[in-house]
Image: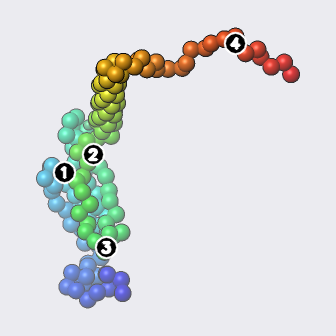
Amino acid sequence: MAIKAYPTRVNHERRENPNRLRTWRTASGGVVTQFWGMRIYCGRCRDCNAPVTTRRNISAHNWGMTQLGRWPELCGECRAVKDAERKRRQVESVRELRRKRSEKERVQRGNLGLPPVRTGRPRKTGPTPKPLDL
Ligand SMILES: [Zn+2]
């Protein structure tokens, strides 16, 4: 039996009012409207105050919770800027980590009396190979 068919008071109420519209305000100041198994969110971007809208199909989540996480706080542009900034910081932190690591390795090799590691392509030695004549 589908969950909508269970004879609970809520399901009965839903069957009786299929076009019921509910609306409420979110903590961040947006408005959610729910009808026909969809939730539509209308809010403002946290940074630039541009309108932010999105919708979710909650009828697909009949068996579980319909609290599917926070509604978006940023508009598409602000989101892209923020993602790019995060990406840049991640790249930088990995670069810094590798720099520290190779510096530590260099010091350890120096303490052991080993020659430093040469990075990059090995230097060519000997005559350069002639191109094949076909
Ligand atoms: Zn924005």
Tell whether circle 2 marks a residue whose Cβ is less than 8 angstroms from ligand 1: yes
User: In this figure, what is the number of numbered marks?
Assistant: 4
Amino acid marked by disc 1? Gly
The disc, 4 or 3, on the residue closer to the chain's N-terminal end is 3
Secondary structure beneath label 2: strand
Residue 3's spot in the image, x, y percent? 31, 81
Amino acid marked by disc 3? Asn
Judged from this view, the residue extending furthest toward the bottom is 7
C-beta proximity under 8 Å, tags 4 and 1 = no
Looking at the image, which residue is at 32% across and 69% down? 61
- Where on the picture, by quarter, is residue 21? bottom left
Left/right placement of residue 29 relative to residue 99 reads: left
Secondary structure beneath label 4: loop
Residue 4's spot in the image, x, y percent? 31, 81
- Where on the picture, by quarter, is residue 44? top left
- Where on the picture, by quarter, is residue 81? top left
Secondary structure beneath label 3: loop
The disc, 1 or 3, on the residue closer to the chain's N-terminal end is 1
Image position of 64 with respect to 7: above or below = above
Residue 119 got which mark? Answer: none
Residue under label 4: 128
Marks 3 and 2 sit apart, C-alpha to C-alpha, by 26 Å
Residue under label 1: 30
| Pointer 4 local density, CA inside 10 Å: few below 14, some 14–19, many at least 20 | few
Q: Nearer the viewer, residue 108 or 92?
A: 108
